[in-house]
Image (cartoon, rainbow, N blue to C red):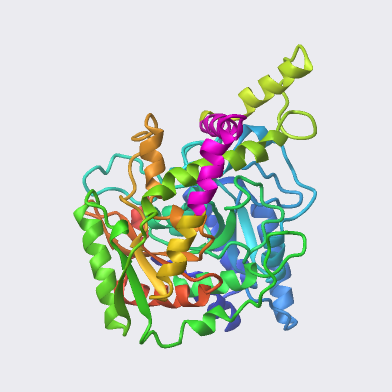
């Protein structure tokens, strides 16, 4: 790809081979050229150009931050002061926060420049970026056998993935509840990192499922992910789930030897239904890691098969609770045609939420209701503990776990809209790490039979993003993945 990666662009800025203003102007030109991909809900070109001039002045004074002058996109789950934040929903169509999320504040302090708010599934509920009130986001890749089909970018952070894949931003923030960073990263051929739960603050991020949501970087390569995570991570007293633990130098960790590390392989992550091309890539990933000096060890994850139903009980219960605040009273959409208070509640929620959000709220309310709480929600929490114990036991034998990121490559828009269960199965490999709060990364490592990107996932120990990134760099160097060319976007 002819556009720079985040890390490459930083080097050019540091060496004064390019100015922040020139970089932002070039990025905004790409945003305009690829607007048809619908990656951005709210572009912010004027603010970006103004920020670039300030950035160049700051660098001239020797006060450049870690990400000074680098263009990024912000998933529309992150509250941004004075800039519309919608969560991809009609419910928040006109919501303009008076405050800034902690993660985006940190990125601003580091000197990054936002080019806009990225499209996403409504309230982060989806795996294809086709539940957004603002329209489908389109994957810039095309199938070699169905070139006329518009492909999904994955979700929920689809707009962030597309922005990076198409060079409309050099990095983007995502949120990952059950795979919403890693799955779209795999579908769009980029790198996506979900940090350990508690590594990045959730304050100012619109909540989906509070015990699962975690912010992370989406970039073109591993070095850029390390750079961006360095800026995003850190303790925040405003977030009760934030963990007060030192943030290591992630970039420095990439240069450490990989020799002697143990890579766990679980048969439960290789079902018989897995396509041959994905199964072959998984084997190739093992060979690459082994060639770098790692030891491949078998592990068992017996509760893996229960992860998806557990996730959809816990996640939906929490979404039902979190979304109860959207009732038309304090902020957000309010129906104009209510005959009573109860009617206002019902109409506001029926009109403000899309069908997928309504489905999840109804299911979540059901599993929390009297008579069903013990049978569903309480039991799911117990199984969640067993899934976490699987990882705890596995990490006694290994340092990282290698899996495929997704059970398929990107599919066409509309293919699975009438089958929500089939859609939910896209998260089968990403959900276990989310339930356990573990760091995990997706690396673009190969192409499917239709010449579409396929990702490999590495899952690490709690707060060991450094080793996850190091393993990701080994896979990236070995795969030599070919990013989209300029013409592939057209």
In screen coordinates, is 239 left or right of 87?
right
User: Percent position (x, y) of residue 120?
Assistant: 53, 45
Q: Is residue 73 above or below residue 481?
A: above
User: Percent position (x, y) of residue 1?
Assistant: 38, 65
- Location of residue 202 (image quadrant): bottom right
Helix, strand or loop: magenta stretch: helix
Q: Is residue 43 above or below residue 321?
A: below
Q: Is residue 366 magenta?
A: yes
Name the residue: 41% across, 41% down.
424
Q: Is residue 120 magenta?
A: no
Q: Nearer the viewer, residue 23 or 307?
A: 307
Q: Nearer the viewer, residue 128 or 63?
A: 128
Q: Is residue 145 above or below residue 398?
A: above
Name the residue: 64% across, 53% down.
45
- So how many labels did they put on this image? 0
Magenta-tinted stretch: 356-384
> Quick check: can you spot residue 418?
yes
Name the residue: 52% across, 30% down.
359
In screen coordinates, is 456 left or right of 94?
left
Q: Nearer the viewer, residue 335 or 234?
A: 234
User: Percent position (x, y) of residue 249?
Assistant: 58, 81
User: Percent position (x, y) of residue 417?
Assistant: 39, 32
Name the residue: 63% across, 32% down.
90
């Amino acid at each position: 790809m002819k556009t720079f990666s985040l890390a490459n662009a930083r080097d050019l800025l540091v060496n004064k081979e390019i100015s922040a203003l020139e970089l932002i102007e070039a990025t905004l030109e790409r945003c305009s050229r690829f607007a048809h991909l619908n990656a951005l809900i709210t572009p912010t070109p004027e603010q970006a150009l103004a920020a670039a001039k300030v950035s160049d002045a700051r660098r001239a004074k020797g006060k450049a931050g870690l990400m000074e002058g680098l263009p990024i996109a912000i998933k529309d789950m992150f509250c941004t002061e004075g800039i519309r934040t919608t969560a991809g929903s009609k419910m928040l169509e006109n919501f303009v926060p008076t405050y800034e999320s902690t993660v985006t504040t940190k990125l601003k302090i580091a000197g990054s420049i936002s080019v806009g708010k990225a499209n996403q599934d409504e309230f982060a509920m989806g795996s294809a970026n086709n539940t957004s009130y603002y329209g489908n986001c389109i994957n810039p890749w095309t199938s070699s056998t169905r070139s006329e089909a518009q492909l999904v970018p994955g979700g929920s952070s689809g707009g962030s993935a597309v922005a990076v894949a198409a060079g409309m931003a050099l990095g983007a923030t995502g949120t990952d509840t059950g795979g919403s960073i890693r799955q779209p990263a795999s579908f769009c051929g980029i790198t996506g990192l979900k940090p350990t739960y508690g590594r990045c603050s959730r304050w100012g991020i619109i909540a989906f499922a509070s015990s699962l949501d975690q912010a992370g970087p989406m970039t073109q390569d591993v070095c850029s992910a390390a750079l961006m995570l360095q800026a995003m991570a850190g303790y925040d007293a405003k977030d009760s789930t934030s963990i007060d633990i030192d943030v290591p130098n992630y970039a420095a960790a990439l240069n450490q030897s990989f020799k002697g590390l143990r890579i766990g392989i679980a048969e439960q992550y290789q079902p018989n239904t897995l396509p041959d091309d994905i199964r072959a890539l998984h084997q190739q990933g093992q060979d690459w890691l082994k060639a770098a000096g790692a030891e491949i060890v078998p592990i068992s994850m017996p509760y893996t098969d229960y992860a998806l139903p557990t996730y959809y009980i816990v996640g939906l219960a929490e979404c039902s609770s979190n979304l109860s605040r959207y009732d038309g009273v304090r902020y957000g959409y309010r129906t104009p045609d209510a005959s009573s208070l109860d009617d206002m509640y019902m109409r506001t929620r029926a009109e403000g939420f899309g069908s997928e959000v309504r489905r999840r709220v109804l299911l979540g309310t059901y599993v929390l209701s009297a008579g069903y709480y013990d049978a569903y929600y309480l039991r799911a929490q117990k199984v969640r503990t067993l899934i976490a114990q699987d990882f705890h036991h596995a990490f006694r034998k290994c340092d990282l776990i290698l899996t495929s990121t997704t059970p398929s490559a990107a599919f066409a828009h509309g293919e699975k809209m009438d089958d929500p269960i089939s859609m939910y199965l896209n998260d089968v490999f990403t959900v276990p790490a989310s339930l356990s709060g573990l760091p995990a990364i997706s690396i673009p490592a190969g192409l499917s039979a239709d010449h579409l990107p396929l990702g490999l996932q590495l899952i690490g120990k709690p707060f060991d993003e450094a080793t996850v990134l190091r393993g990701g760099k080994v896979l990236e160097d070995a795969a030599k993945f070919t990013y989209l060319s300029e013409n592939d976007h057209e």
